[in-house]
């Protein structure tokens, strides 16, 4: 059946299925929430492995609860299917495939130049650099810079200038290096290839039927010289290199003798391992030592280089202090999708390094504290960047009144903020039965008073807390 259908057609159908799954919330279906960085599918948590590594580097803590379970489930998938996410699921990867198709047909003169190869270690260098920068800045930095995460957030929460990152990645693929982002830059793909090195499913090679025509090398989008040349030449194990291969299946479709196919790892034909030289042993030892030094450096750098404690945005209920919040937030958007009042927004480029994180614009749509129930946003947060203990009061900020602009303080009759407050008579009281006064000890910072103020701009606004 697969010989008739072809793996490429099946992969394209699968990509469309995952596009539809991602966009389900826009149609009002709650079966899938979040992005492929962190999500819930039918209540089952899923957490990206590189995102978890950034949280560890930025926040200095392990994931817990649903996020940890989601990480284990995703790692198990990688250990079975290898780096298949890049070819079968990633929305940016499917766009790259479309750009690849366009480049082959509309820009044939650019094709030879786009076959140039970058060093295999380049994506590892990018991954390590981003982990170090995450430790220095105190937040999951790649989720701010990532074109794939930016693409998903833009589709779900509104387009903006951040799509420039997606455009740059596509142009890089079109004019500089074929599948350049996926092959040589993407740090998440570097970690996926590490997990794929131990995967059970491989592209196996039957050397008895292969005539070494080279078609598989030509069609491989991940640089066939790296993935298949050694295999076709008869050197090493009879499989596509799992460090690079994304298990897309294009080489299987292209092989005229059906010498390639998906096989379990135990069915891969082995090869004799050449004896290691002293130089190889030294390089391996230095690599292990360098990894240990890097891990130690990240753990030391994080407390010394933590992000400043200042908070400029009003965060949703249960937000941890800003340095810890930014270190744990994966920018997945699940809190915004769960908010029954659609009060939670996703920060854009104008908010700097907070891009992709949730905030509340109280003047436009304030938080109603879920009607006194447990806040839905904190309940769905996979990393507990938003977290409230049972019975813990909500403290988002403090409302501040500008008496020089407030109608009631100027002698008019106005009770808009008092009537809107869910704790009226306690958080906001009327002094002399006319003038509103805020009790900072009881104010939750929900922003309903700011939303309902009759003056423009509002005479009462919420100052975010910075505990």
Image (tube, rainbow, N blue to C red):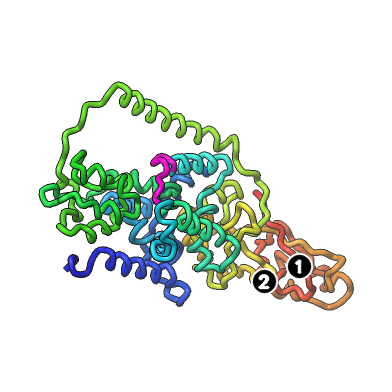
Residue occupied by mark 1: 429
Q: Residue furthest top?
A: 278
Residue 31 quadrant: bottom left
Tell me the chief SS of the magenta region. Answer: loop
Badge 2: few (under 14), some or many (20 or more) residues near its Cα, within 10 Å? few
Name which residue lies at 45% across and 72% down.
25
Q: Considering only vertical position in the picture, is 90 above or below 422?
A: above
Residue occupied by mark 2: 364
Rendered-image quadrant of the N terminus: bottom left
Residue 15 percent across, percent down from the top left = 35, 66
> What residue span does the magenta drawing correspond to?
115-122
Residue 268 appears left or right of 167: left
Residue 45 appears left or right of 198: right
Q: Considering only vertical position in the picture, is 285 above or below 416?
A: above
Residue 84 percent across, percent down from the top left = 31, 55
Residue 255: numbered disc: none
Residue 304 in sight from this viewpoint: yes
């Amino acid at each position: 059946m697969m010989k008739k259908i072809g793996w490429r057609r099946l992969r394209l159908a699968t990509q469309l299925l995952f596009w539809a799954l991602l966009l389900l919330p826009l149609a009002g279906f709650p079966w899938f929430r979040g992005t492929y960085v962190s999500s819930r599918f039918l209540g089952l948590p899923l957490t990206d492995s590189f995102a978890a590594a950034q949280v560890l580097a930025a926040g200095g803590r392990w994931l817990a609860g649903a996020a940890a379970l989601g990480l284990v489930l995703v790692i198990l998938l990688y250990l079975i299917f290898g780096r298949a996410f890049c070819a079968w699921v990633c929305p940016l990867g499917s766009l790259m495939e479309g750009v690849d198709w366009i480049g082959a047909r509309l820009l044939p003169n650019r094709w030879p130049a786009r076959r140039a190869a970058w060093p295999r270690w380049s994506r590892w260098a990018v991954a390590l650099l981003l982990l170090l920068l995450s430790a220095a800045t105190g937040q999951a930095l790649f989720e701010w810079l990532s074109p794939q995460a930016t693409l998903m957030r833009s589709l779900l929460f509104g387009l903006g200038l951040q799509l420039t990152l997606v455009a740059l990645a596509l142009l890089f693929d079109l004019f500089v290096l074929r599948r350049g982002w996926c092959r040589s830059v993407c740090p998440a793909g570097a970690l996926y290839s590490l997990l794929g090195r131990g995967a059970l499913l491989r592209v196996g090679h039957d050397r008895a039927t292969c005539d070494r025509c080279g078609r598989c090398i030509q069609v491989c989008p991940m640089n066939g010289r790296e993935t298949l040349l050694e295999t076709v030449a008869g050197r090493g194990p009879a499989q596509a290199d799992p460090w690079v291969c994304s298990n897309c299946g294009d080489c299987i479709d292209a092989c005229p003798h059906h010498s390639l196919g998906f096989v379990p790892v135990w069915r891969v034909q082995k090869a004799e391992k050449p004896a290691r030289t002293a130089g190889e042993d030294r390089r391996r030892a230095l690599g292990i030592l360098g990894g240990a030094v890097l891990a130690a450096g990240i753990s030391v750098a994080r407390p010394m280089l933590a992000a400043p404690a200042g908070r400029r945005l009003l965060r949703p209920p249960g937000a941890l202090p800003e340095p810890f919040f930014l270190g744990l937030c994966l920018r997945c958007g699940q809190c915004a999708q769960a908010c029954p009042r659609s009060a939670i927004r996703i920060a854009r480029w104008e908010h700097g390094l907070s891009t992709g994180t949730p905030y509340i614009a109280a003047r436009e749509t304030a938080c109603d504290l879920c009607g006194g129930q447990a806040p839905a946003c904190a309940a769905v947060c996979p990393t507990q960047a938003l977290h409230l203990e049972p019975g813990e009061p909500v403290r988002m900020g403090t409302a501040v009144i500008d008496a020089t602009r407030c109608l009631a303080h100027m002698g008019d009759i106005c009770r808009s903020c008092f009537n809107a407050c869910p704790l009226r008579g306690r958080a906001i009281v009327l002094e002399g039965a006319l003038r509103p006064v805020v009790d900072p000890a009881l104010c939750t910072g929900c922003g309903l008073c700011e939303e309902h103020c009759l003056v423009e701009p509002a005479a009462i606004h919420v100052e975010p807390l910075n505990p």
